[in-house]
Amino acid sequence: AQSVTQLDSHVSVSEGTPVLLRCNYSSSYSPSLFWYVQHPNKGLQLLLKYTSAATLVKGINGFEAEFKKSETSFHLTKPSAHMSDAAEYFCVVSDKGGSYIPTFGRGTSLIVHP
Amino acid sequence: EAGVAQSPRYKIIEKRQSVAFWCNPISGHATLYWYQQILGQGPKLLIQFQNNGVVDDSQLPKDRFSAERLKGVDSTLKIQPAKLEDSAVYLCASTKTPNNEQFFGPGTRLTVL
C-alpha cells in the first residue's frame, strides 16, 4: 500500500532564506507525487507534480522538488522564502497499485519571519 | 473556465441531525473526490468517483455517510446522523483523469454542536 510521510509538522524560516519541506513516500510501483499548497481560508492549489518524467520538477512561485528513488524522497525547496509563502503544504502520492487513489500527508506548516 | 463549486460554504447543526453537501466539478472532469479535512490534519479521502461509478470508498463511514453522483456530473455527500467528530471541512475535487492535477472547491465547513 502506498503511503507518504511529511517529516516536519512546522518549518520556520526568515524571509530571503532557503525553504526545505521534507516528504518521504512508500510505493510498490512507480509513483506519481504532488505538492499542494493551502493558504489560510483558501482552497488547495497544485504547486508541482512528478509523473515519471524529469526527476527535478519545477513548479509555480519558484518552488521545485527532486524525485530521489533511492531515498524514496520528494522534498520541496525554494531558494528564497517570501512572506507570501506562509501556508500549509501537502505532499501527495498515488500509484497504479492503488488505482491512482491519492494519499495526502499530514501537512507542513511553513512560517516565514520578516 | 469555472472552478469546482461547493455549497453551502458553512453549516452548523446539532448532533444527530442530517446534513447534505453539494459539489459541481469542472465541466468534462470524469473523476470526482470527496475529502474530509479535520483541523490540523491533511485531507482524508472519503470517496472517489469515476463518472458515476465508485472507485474507492474504503474510508467512508458507511453507517452514517453516503454519496452519490447519479448522472456523472454533480455529486452530493450526506451525513445522517451527524456526530461531534464530523466537524471538519469537506472538500470536493475533480480531475480530467485519475492521477492528474486535482482542482479543489472552496470547501464546506461543518460544525456539529
Image (cartoon, rainbow, N blue to C red):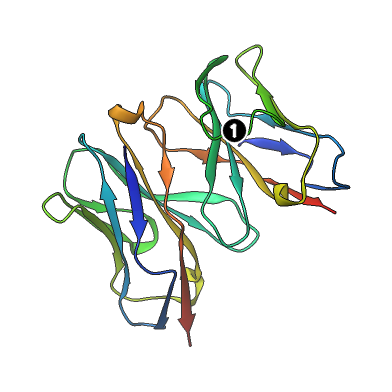
Q: Quadrant of residue A97?
A: top left
Q: Residue furthest top?
A: B71
Residue at 36% in and 30% down = A100
Of A46 and B58, the residue lying toward us: B58
A110 relative to B37, above or below: below
Return the residue at label 1.
B60
Q: Nearer the viewer, residue B6 or A95?
A: A95
Question: Split into 4 quadrants, where in the image is the C terminus of chain B?
Answer: bottom right
**Residue at (49%, 50%) from the top-left corner?**
A45
Q: Tell which residue pokes out farthest to the front in this image.
A: B63
Query: Which SS class for mark 1?
Result: loop
**Mark 1 residue crowding within 10 angstroms, few (<14) / some (14–19) / many (20+):** some
Q: Is residue B34 left or right of residue A5?
A: right
Left or right of B46 in this view: A82 = left
Quarter of the view holding residue A14: bottom left
The answer, for residue A35, to whether it is visible in the render is: yes
Residue B63 on image: x %, y %: 69, 29
Q: Measured from the top left, where is residue A43 in percent x and y?
A: 59, 51
Chain to which mark 1 belongs: B
Above or below, B100 relative to B37: above
> Furthest residue to the bottom?
A114
Q: Taking A97 as reference, is B27 left or right?
A: right
The answer to whether residue B29 is visible is no
Left or right of B35 in this view: B76: right
User: Along the line of sight, which residue is nearer the eye, B51 or B40?
Assistant: B40
Three-letter code for the amino acid on which mark 1 is drawn: Leu
The residue closer to the viewer here, B104 or B54, is B54
- Examine the rendered structure and indicate whether residue B35 appears above or below residue A88: above
Pinpoint residue A13: horizontal percent, then vertical percent.
40, 82
- x, y percent for residue A54: 16, 45
Residue found at the very far left of the displayed protein: A70
Residue depicted at 63% across the width and 59% down the height: B39
